[in-house]
Amino acid sequence: MAASAGSLISMQSRPGMAASRVSGLKPVSLSNQGRNTLSFGLQSVPARRLRVSCAAKPETIDKVCEIVKKQLALSDEIPVSGESKFSTLGADSLDTVEIVMGLEEAFGISVEEESAQSIATVQDAADLIEKLVEKKD
């Protein structure tokens, strides 16, 4: 459960999960847009601002990981996760274009060139895919 009051966000957890508290924020409202779960992360950015980003579903991230491994012909020993950067996995610009094409085909979406250029990690790709799939529906 997340609650916002003044400049405080307090997240209360279920048993076995950690609780968090973040102070110094403006009021925030959250919506799960029909999803069963809502996950988000807080990230510090310059000028003492926080950015809240919604995370893609685990199954979307897993599928993107599979596609990236296939496109880059990575062995099973090389771990690929949401945080994996394409460049760290050895992808050059042509590989990244091929990854995006594979994602478009697998998810039935079309990624604009400007959006494709902003993809640096598996998580970036998964978040963009969910956004595009949601627009499509």
Image (tube, grey):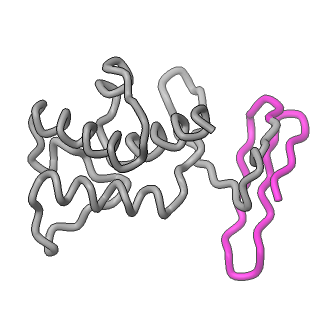
Q: Position of residue 89 (x, y in %)?
A: 15, 51
In the image, 108 versus 12, the foreground residue is: 108
Q: Residue furthest right?
A: 5
Residue found 49% across the figure and 30% down from its top:
45
In the rendered image, residue 96, in percent from the top left (x then y), is placed at: 19, 37
Q: Name the one closer to the observer, 93 or 121.
A: 93
Closer to the camera in the image, 4 or 115: 115
Left or right: 99 as drawn, with respect to 75? right
For residue 65, what is the image quadrant?
bottom left
Relative to 51, 101 lies left or right: left
Residue extending furthest toward the bottom: 16
Magenta highlight on residue 10: yes
Above-or-below relation of 23 to 113: below
Left/right of residue 11 with respect to residue 58 in the rendered view: right
Q: Identify the magenta region.
A: 1-28
Residue at 81 percent of width and 53 percent of height: 2
| Residue 92 image-quadrant placement | top left
Q: In the image, is residue 21 above or below residue 49? A: below
- Residue 74 position in % (x across, y down): 11, 62
The quadrant in which residue 25 appears is: top right
Is 29 contained in the magenta span?
no
